[in-house]
Image (spheres, rainbow, N blue to C red):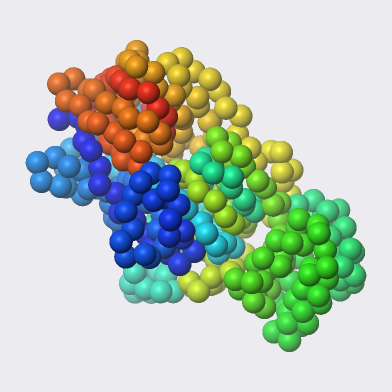
């Protein structure tokens, strides 16, 4: 068998929206808890269930038969599904965060194992040994922070509010010393942080500049946290539905509000700097951040139209390949070289691989094994296709 319907676990993180997934996909939320993320993949923390005869965790299915992954994927990424695919619905800002690169993740994971920190411990930083670059595709208008602004923009925003101590720190450190500035800010004594946040907020309340308004909004959720100043340091970007952006591992970022699809290397490694009730570890965060400025226009991914109604969003990493299929009544076959997950965003499709087929409606997903070799899509709507480079 080469195609399976998936049942996908929901993560109820406190920043999640109670109703976004219900409204978009008609999902039920009887408990009324926040539905933050729907995970589609084989991460051992919360694998999807493949509906064979009895449900089987997707990681067990893949462990049992490596051929599900495809030869190219096995050679490149070893015996695991290389990506994790999610629906993410943020009603509140997430933590300010960065993700490790491969070497950092491996070293951190081995180190914490060596220290005997349980995998599910509150203060565990590295839950696996993988890097975590991310691609985000907006389903609704979506706001995020992605990468450092230019130093000139930072200075302009500090000067507006008369935050002389920050202007001085920037000048004193000079060009190319972003790391020293961020370490200085995060390392301030508590009372200095309090004074700075108080001064910033008294200006923010009077300002109609979007970066300063974002400071106000963050402070409503996390009052007094020094990280409420992040919009002054980071690009605040807005995606319209159908736009996508990429986040390199090592990019300081967070998501602010909206619903999106997210695909990443299969990892749950997050280093946090604030805006959360989860574990914050600033020294470890500082080790993983790439201190480079990013032009906001450079975070967006250019859509590339393929045949068969497919639009691809190509990122610089191999671990995942993301595209959107606008399906018509019947399609030409799609070739499968590596394992795939298809998620129905809109409409109703029947996915046929050989003798088997799976019906998809909004919010539902299926796994296609590399052994399928090809499949057809019948029915009108929009599918999101997640795979890795073959
Ligand atoms: Zn992230």
Say left or right for 214 vs 106: right
Say left or right for 307 vs 233: left
Give the quadrant of residue 365.
Answer: top left
Say left or right for 148 vs 362: right
Q: Is residue 239 visible?
A: yes
Q: In the rendered image, which quarter contains the N terminus? A: top left
Give the quadrant of residue 155.
Answer: bottom right
Q: Give the percent coordinates (x, y) of residue 146.
A: 64, 50
Name the residue rendered at 77%, 62% in the picture.
212
**Compared to 313, does 255 lie above or below?**
below
Q: Give the percent coordinates (x, y) of residue 44.
A: 29, 55
Give the quadrant of residue 241.
Answer: top right
Name the residue rendered at 33%, 15% in the picture.
330
Q: In the rendered image, which quarter contains the C terminus? A: top left
Name the residue rendered at 32%, 65% in the picture.
31
Q: Nearer the viewer, residue 244 or 149?
A: 244
Q: Nearer the viewer, residue 302 or 78?
A: 302
Name the residue rendered at 81%, 59% in the picture.
208
């Amino acid at each position: 068998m080469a195609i399976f319907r998936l049942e996908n676990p929901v993560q109820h993180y406190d920043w999640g929206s109670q109703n976004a997934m219900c409204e978009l996909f008609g999902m039920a939320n009887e408990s009324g808890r926040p539905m933050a993320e729907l995970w589609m993949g084989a991460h051992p923390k919360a694998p999807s269930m493949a509906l064979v005869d009895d449900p089987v965790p997707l990681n067990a299915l893949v462990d049992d038969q490596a051929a599900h992954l495809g030869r190219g994927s096995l050679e490149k990424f070893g015996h695991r599904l290389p990506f994790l695919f999610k629906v993410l619905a943020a009603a509140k800002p997430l933590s300010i965060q960065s993700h490790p690169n491969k070497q950092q993740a491996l070293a951190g994971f081995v180190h914490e194992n060596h220290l005997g920190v349980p995998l599910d411990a509150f203060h565990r930083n590295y839950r696996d040994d993988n890097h975590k670059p991310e691609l985000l595709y907006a389903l609704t208008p979506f706001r995020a922070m992605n990468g450092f602004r230019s130093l000139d923009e930072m200075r302009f925003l500090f000067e507006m509010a008369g935050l002389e101590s920050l202007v001085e720190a920037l000048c004193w450190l000079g060009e190319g010393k972003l790391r020293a500035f961020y370490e200085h800010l995060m390392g301030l004594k508590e009372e200095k942080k309090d004074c700075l946040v108080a001064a910033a907020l008294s200006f923010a309340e009077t300002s109609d500049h979007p970066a300063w308004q974002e400071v106000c909004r963050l402070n409503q959720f996390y009052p007094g946290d020094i990280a409420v100043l992040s919009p002054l340091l980071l690009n605040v970007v807005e995606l319209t539905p159908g736009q996508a952006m990429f986040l390199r591992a090592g990019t300081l970022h967070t998501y602010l509000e909206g619903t999106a699809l997210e695909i990443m290397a299969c990892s749950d490694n997050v280093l946090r700097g604030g805006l959360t009730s989860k574990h914050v570890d600033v020294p470890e965060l500082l080790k993983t951040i790439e201190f480079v400025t990013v032009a906001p226009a450079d975070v967006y991914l250019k859509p590339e139209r393929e045949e068969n109604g497919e639009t691809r969003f190509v990122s610089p990493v191999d671990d995942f390949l993301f595209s959107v299929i606008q399906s018509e009544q019947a399609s030409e076959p799609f070739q499968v070289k590596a394992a795939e997950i298809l998620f129905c965003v809109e409409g109703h499709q029947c996915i046929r691989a050989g003798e088997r087929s799976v019906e998809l409606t909004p919010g539902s997903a299926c796994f296609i094994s590399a052994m399928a070799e090809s499949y057809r899509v019948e029915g009108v709507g929009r599918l999101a296709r997640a795979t890795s480079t073959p």
